Image (cartoon, helix red, strand yellow):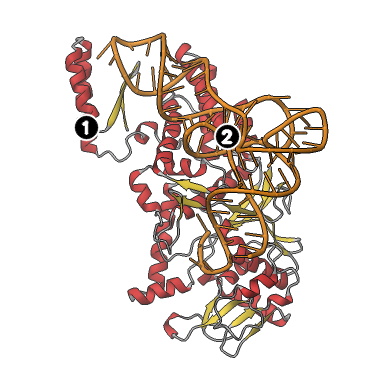
Amino acid sequence: MFIYDSVQKTKREFIPLEEGKVSLYVCGPTVYDDAHLGHAKSALVFDLLTRVLSANGYDVTYARNITDIDDKIIKKALTLNQDIKEITDFYTAAFHKEMDALGVGRPDIEPKATESLEAMHEMMQKLIDSGHAYATKDGDVYFDTSSDSEYLSLSKRHQDEDDKQERVASSSLKKNPTDFAMWKSVKDDSLTYESPYGKGRPGWHLECSAMIEKHLAQPNTAFAVDIHGGGADLLFPHHENEAAQTRCSSNHELANYWMHNGFVNIDGEKMSKSLGNSFFIKDALKEYDGEVLRFYLLSTHYRSNFNFNSEDLSTAKKRLDKIYRLKKRLFGLAENSETTPFRDELLKVLSDDMNVSAALALIDEMISNANETLDTAGKHKVLKRETISNLAYINSLLGFGVKNPFKYFQFGMNEDTKERIALLITKRGVAKKEKNFEASDTLRDEILAFGVTLMDTPTGTFWEKV
RNA sequence: GGUGCCAUCGCCAAGUGGUAAGGCCGCAGCCUGCAAAGCUGCUAUCCCCAGUUCAAAUCUGGGUGGCACCUCCA
């Protein structure tokens, strides 16, 4: 298994801290709004990573946090006059539902900030005791970046540049411009959390460091976790600050391998809250099967920036369709999971820093070969067995082809329409049998008007939604 | 301004020294009552210039053009 380390900027062979085991931590969503395609991309990338690691025989412990303490949440609570927990519960549930639709497995551990305050206080206290952090008279607690000689080693920035980039001059109580808040005092009693330093809320960076230390870190290892992942934008300042806190409060570095996934743009433009062009997962799911979205978002290498547009999405669907059509041809045959050369190759390319493109090329080649043989020698038993095994492997490793192939092609069609189509197909079948092609073609036009295609096969006539 | 990434067929996209994967689109054909689906065949020398090398899309230098981070953000 090889992984590109985005801090060392090189592809490295993956060697776990503890043989046979992998600890993986990924920054999860802040639950104050609907999740957008960027959240989907990140979740999908690391879902794939856990599948590939598992297929390589590793026992994976995957943690992805839920940030349920945040200024944006507090702001929303005030604006809507709602309880904080009401908001975070709502968006956490929505997030889970959308991840399910995308075929993203639940992490083994899903820590919430609200349930990890004690761990945060512990870490903060250690940092204060060791002189790496300080409390101000306002009740804020800051990390002293000048106390960490390794600060900025992740993002490889230069201190002097960050000095002049300071734009918020209000925090004059900071010792250094780059010092960041671990605890911020908040006056409004209804929106605060208790701490030994007064009421307030924890800083975002502290949440992740503390949760990793509490849930994943092993004692006496050089790193708290094997792999830390997240979106490319998180490298600085979020991961830099996380790493500093962990480094200075414990005897290990934060992560052995850092993985950052590329961004999702919409029609060439960055998707962001400030631009107001966020593309929510829930909206995309209205038009496309979650698996199509999964296939599309995973079809480009995880480190590349991804330019979302509907043309490419429908191209991706066509490619996924081919998997399902082959599955249809083999529908009802006994399942098996025998080893095949294809399986070995597929795992091999995915184990090389998740080369999905190469994997898809292998899949298309496998499909093409299988179809060709089925066309010319339909009773080829060995090939059928192998193909079923191959499809099952694609299913478990990539999460493609999970559904019933007939249902897949009926996405978004209501029962009433399905019945009417079935009736017309029966009528057309009769006309065809009587060689009344004029009538059968008229019936076909009626069927196509429902936005479907028709295909006559040896085992019957089937339709697919276009 | 600082730091970093990228530039491969009409479109999407692999490939990091050994002579250009795959998909979509297009064209030709097989199959089909006709279609659809499936299958077969055809379609690029890798932004520009210079260099290193027996050999470069792949390494080095210089251009040009995109983009990201530095501010909440996956």
Q: Going from the N terminus, do you reach mark 1 or mark 2 first?
A: 2
Percent x, y of residue A319: 45, 32
Question: Mark 2 — residue?
Answer: A359
Say which residue appears at 23% left-offset and 17% top-offset.
A429
Looking at the image, which residue is at 73% across and 53% down?
Answer: A18
Residue that appears at 72% across and 81% down: A131
Amino acid bearing label 1? Glu
Residue ID at (62%, 67%): A209
Label 1 element class: helix
Q: Chain of mark 2?
A: A
Q: Quadrant of residue B70?
A: bottom right
Which mark lies nearer to you, 1 or 2?
2
Front position in the image: A417 or A7:
A7
Q: Disc number at residue A419?
A: 1
Q: Position of residue B18 (x, y in %)?
A: 72, 27
Question: Is A298 drawn above or below residue A385 in the view shown?
Answer: below
Query: How much space separates mark 1 and mark 2, taking CA atoms?
Result: 38 Å
Quarter holding the C terminus of chain A?
top left
User: Which amino acid is tagged 2?
Assistant: Ala
Question: In this image, A213 relative to A168: left or right?
Answer: right
Q: Residues within 10 Å of mark 2 (few under 14, many from 20)?
A: many
Q: Nearer the viewer, residue B53 or A118?
A: B53
Q: Nearer the viewer, residue A229 or A236?
A: A236
Please provide percent x and percent y for residue A123. Answer: 65, 75
**From what the image shows, is residue B56 above or below residue A217?**
above
Q: Residue furthest bottom?
A: A137
